[in-house]
Structure formats: structure tokens, C-alpha cells
Amino acid sequence: MSKPVLYDYWRSSASYRVRIALNLLGISYETVPVNLLEKEQKTPQHLARNPQGLVPVLEIDGLRLTQSLAIIEYLDETRPGSGLLPPDAVGRARVRALAQAIAADIHPVCNLGPVSHVMALTKGGDEVRVAWMQKFIGEGLAAFETLLDSPATGLFCHGDRPTMADLCLVPQVYNALRWNADIGVLQRVNTIAQRCADLPAFEAAAPRN
């Protein structure tokens, strides 16, 4: 079977999540860059891979998969012992809730398309973009910090090994730092993100400036 291929943009949070997952599972893959700033995601070639015009797209096991959380859940279900989701229903529900608090609530409003549209509507410059990012990333991660105030939180977001929740948290903290969002007081968020960043799988997946 051919080597997995990840259609990827280096700064995409969603792609970053999948890179971490592949690294954690020891899955070797090839990367095909899709430059979002040059709108390569809207070319016919990429729309044939994903009609939404988004990244990531992962070709693996003879399949073409989209949506980062769906990809991560597929990897968890097809690679026994991955630990990306807990074995129990309650744990899986909590990890999914944590992951979606970022992937479904923070990420969409801070994505390239919506933010560019807000800037066009307001006729604002970069100060509008920065203020928008700081507000929604800061508020979202503050809520996430409260969600982590649970006995189920361990060394990582859920328990003592990285799960899908950590795969969502780390890219969002990267974005928070990039946009200077006020997250310095978020002790659990920052401690867990740093603990993850020290792991080789996370470090290898990190965006390279």
C-alpha cells in the first residue's frame, strides 16, 4: 500500500492536529503543501480532493479523508492502542467536548476566510484582525481552562497521556502566542501545552517559521 499523503498548510491548526496524530502513531507520511495565502485550496485540483476547499486532506489506507477530528478518530479506531480517545464512553465524551470547544468554537471564527471577511466589512486593517483574534482565542482558551478544572485532568487534558483534546489545544496555544492573546494566567492550559511541546511527536509537528 502506498505511503500516506497529507495535503497540508504549515500554519493550519487543523493540519497541525493531524501531523501530531500521525507522529504519535509512528505513521510515516509525505506532505503536499497547499498554500492558503495563495488560495491554492480553491484550485480545481484541491477542490477535487476536498470540495470545501480546506486542509487537511489525508490519503491513507486507500481512502481520502477530510476534517481533522474525523481523521484523528479514524486513526484511533484503526490503530489499536493509539490512546487518542479513551477506552470508556464517559472519557470519550469528555475528550470530544474538549476538542470541539476548540475545533468547533474557537477555530472557525478565527479562520482565514471569516477574518478576512470581517476586515473587508469593517474596512479595517491589521489592527482589526489582531483585536478579533485576541478576543476569540483569549475568551475561548479561558473557558477551556475552566473545563480543565476536573478530576479527569491529569498530566494532559484527560488523564496522563495525550488525547485528541491535547492535539487541539497545542495548535490553539500556538495561535494565541502568535496573536499575543492574553493567556498568561491560564495555568492548566499553559502547563499542559508546554508538557506536550516537550514530546518529540508534538515538536516535530510544530510550524516552522
Image (tube, rainbow, N blue to C red):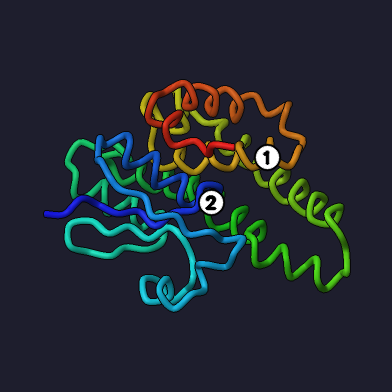
Please give the name of the residue rendered at 83% of the width and 73% of the height, measured from the top-left corner. Answer: 121
Q: Is residue 146 left or right of residue 169?
A: right
- Residue at image mark 1: 176
Please give the name of the residue rendered at 27% of the width and 59% of the height, measured from the top-left corner. Answer: 59
Out of 170 and 4, give the one closest to the viewer. Answer: 4
SS state under label 2 = loop
Counting every numbered tag in the picture gives 2
Quarter holding the C terminus is top right
Pinpoint residue 61: horizontal percent, then vertical percent: 17, 57
Of the two numbered discs 1 and 2 on the same chain, state the one appearing first in sequence.
2
Against 18, residue 198 (above or below) is above
Q: Amino acid at mark 1?
A: Ala
Out of 53 and 81, give the one closest to the viewer. Answer: 53
SS state under label 1 = helix
Quarter holding the N terminus is bottom left
Say few, some or many: other residues with alpha carbon within 10 Å of mark 1 (under 14 / 14 to 19 / 20 or more): some
User: Disc number at residue 128?
Assistant: none
Disc number lying in front (1 or 2) = 2
Pinpoint residue 138: horizontal percent, then vertical percent: 72, 42
Pinpoint residue 100: horizontal percent, then vertical percent: 50, 52
Q: Amino acid at mark 2?
A: Ser
Residue 85 appears anywhere in the view: no
Pinpoint residue 176: horizontal percent, then vertical percent: 68, 40
Q: Is residue 136 left or right of residue 94?
A: right
Please give the name of the residue rendered at 54% of the width and 41% of the height, measured from the top-left corner. Answer: 171
Please give the name of the residue rendered at 64% of the width and 61% of the height, measured from the top-left corner. Answer: 112
Q: Is residue 55 left or right of residue 29?
A: right
Out of 144 and 117, give the one closest to the viewer. Answer: 117
- Residue at image mark 2: 12
